[in-house]
Amino acid sequence: MKIKNTFEKNFLNNKNILVTGASKGIGKELAVTLSSYGANIILHGRDEKALDKVYDEIIDTTETSPLIIQCDLNDLDENKSQNIANIISENVNILDGIIHNAAIIGKMSSIHDFDLKTWNKVINTNLTSTYLLTKYLTPLMADSKNPRVIFTSSGVVRKGRAFWGAYAISKTAVKSLAEILNDELEPITNIRVFNFDPGATRTSMRAFAYPAENASTLKEPSSLMKYYLWMLSKESSKSDLRYIEFKN
């Protein structure tokens, strides 16, 4: 799917959008870019100092109102999820978007050598937290005119690959979660659910998975932004596509 970047500069004015993993990589690029289109970004991440830098950049370059939520998704439970929902509802009237971007690989290992502690951390961070945040935050989207939930997929969901372990399993499950959520919500709400595969991108996660790869051959996170802008736009409401893949 090819998309032209022809969006009006302020088409996200006053939209409140949560971006998980917003301190670096694709998440940071999303936070800064969507802010430039007028969105108030709820910045989630583990590293408070890194989040502060993104917050300051947004404050210095836009007139939006970002919000920081510092949280390790590995430790997320129902009480913490409700607390996050409470914090958001205390600061904004409506939540317009959730972008599930945060994820970890854990380690590249055979199943036999994969330790349970790392397994649980990957599943908690990539899958369970995504389920919990979706469960507790989508009620805040009830009054949004153009609500969106965007999950992040990966090429590993197409076929199981050796050594990708818990990451591949978590991403395959997230794809199913997105499909189930869409099937449940589409008949009763105006929430649009998307699953986006960004493909090979120059990020620290990619460098971890492919340490010998020449990073200069990979696309920058900025090249993905037109896809997110399209998914957040009214134009995407006319489309039946729910699984989106980056195409040059």
Image (spheres, grey):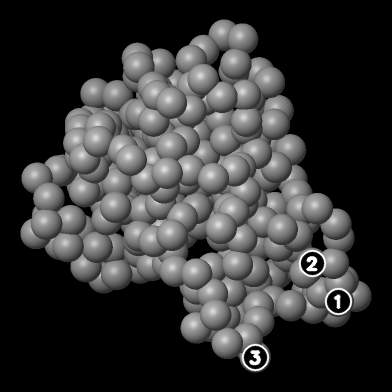
Location of residue 162 in the rendering, given as x and y in whole percent from the top left corner: 86, 72
Location of residue 33 in the rendering, given as x and y in whole percent from the top left corner: 29, 52
Report the side of 196 relative to 13 (left or right). right
Amino acid at dot 1: Ser
Q: Residue furthest bottom?
A: 212
In which image quadrant can residue 96 be found? Answer: top left
Location of residue 26 in the rendering, given as x and y in whole percent from the top left corner: 44, 61
Q: Are marks 1 and 2 in contact (CB under 8 Å)?
A: yes
Q: Classify 108 as above or below 14.
A: below
Could you tell me which secondary element the residue under label 3 belongs to?
loop
| Mark linked to residue 165 | 2
Question: Which residue is found at the position 49% from the left and 22% from the top?
Answer: 237
Question: Which residue is found at the position 29% from the left and 69% from the top?
Answer: 50
Q: Classify 91 as above or below 71.
A: above
Amino acid at dot 3: Ala
Q: Does the rendering let one see residue 10?
A: yes
Q: Classify 176 as above or below 168.
A: above
In which image quadrant can residue 9 be found? Answer: top left
From the image, state whether disc 2 or disc 3 is nearer to you. Answer: 3
Amino acid at dot 2: Gly
Label 3 neighbour load within 10 Å: few <14, some 14-19, many 20+ = few
Report the side of 9 relative to 126 (left or right). left
Q: Classify 19 as above or below 141.
A: below
Please state which of residues 105 and 70 is positioned toward the viewer in this rendering.
105
Please name the residue that numbered disc 3 is placed on: 212
Please name the residue that numbered disc 1 is placed on: 110
Ranked by sequence position, the earlier of labels 2 and 3 is 2
Location of residue 90 in the rendering, given as x and y in whole percent from the top left corner: 23, 31
Kindly report the distance in space between the C-alpha atoms of the residues bearing marks 2 and 3: 20 Å
